[in-house]
Image: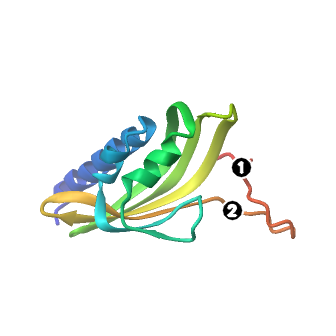
Amino acid sequence: MTTSEKIDEKSAVAAVIEEWSKAISGKDAARVVSHLTDKVVQFTLAPPLQYKGKDAEDLQGWFNTWQGPIGGEARDVEINVGGDVAFTRGLVRMTGTKTDGEQVDLWFRQTLGLLRQAGSWKIAHVHTSVPFYMDGSFKGAFDLKP
């Protein structure tokens, strides 16, 4: 792959992630899952430990716990592409208001694995996490900021 081709593929991957992120912000579950492979595996912030497949109903249920859009900001994003496989990593900020009035402002780590299928990039793996304090409390370190 030439340098120009790698730049084009990185741009294509970035565009998919941008559209996926906009769908999350807009709480459009059908559009979110349209960017996923059928066999996507997700290790998200919420239980269970792993989630396989795409289910717009579960996602829409979570979206329904938010008032208005879900804010998002990405920082320190790196995209790597090789053939029909790509992965990204970075820090993501999620903001917004839950239906119970709770204000959310959370930074977390995110890694995405993508596959090129029929000429299009699809997200095949999602991993989000926050570190936890190693002081014996095992509490999530939700107060960290980059």
Image disc number at residue 131: 2
CA neighbours of label 2 inside 10 A, class few (<14), some (14 to 19), many (20+)? few
Residue at 52%, 35% in the rendered image: 71
Secondary structure under the numbered disc 2 in the rendered image? loop
CA neighbours of label 1 inside 10 A, class few (<14), some (14 to 19), many (20+)? few
Residue at 41%, 34% in the rendered image: 26
Q: Earlier in the sequence, mark 2 or mark 1?
A: 2
Q: Amino acid at mark 1?
A: Leu
Q: Residue furthest right?
A: 136
Q: Residue furthest left?
A: 118
82 sits left or right of 28 in the view: left
Q: Is residue 74 something that shows in the picture? A: no
Please state the horizontal and vertical placement of residue 51, each as a whole percent of the image: 47, 68
24 sits left or right of 66 in the view: left
Please state the horizontal and vertical placement of residue 96, each as a whole percent of the image: 59, 33
Image disc number at residue 144: 1
Nearest to the observer: residue 91 or residue 1: 91
Please state the horizontal and vertical placement of residue 77, each as a whole percent of the image: 45, 51
Residue at 74%, 47% in the rendered image: 143
Figure check: 74 above or below 126: above
Residue at 65%, 39% in the rendered image: 105
Nearest to the observer: residue 69 or residue 60: 60
72 sits left or right of 114 in the view: right
Q: Amino acid at mark 2?
A: Pro
Q: Is residue 84 something that shows in the picture? A: yes
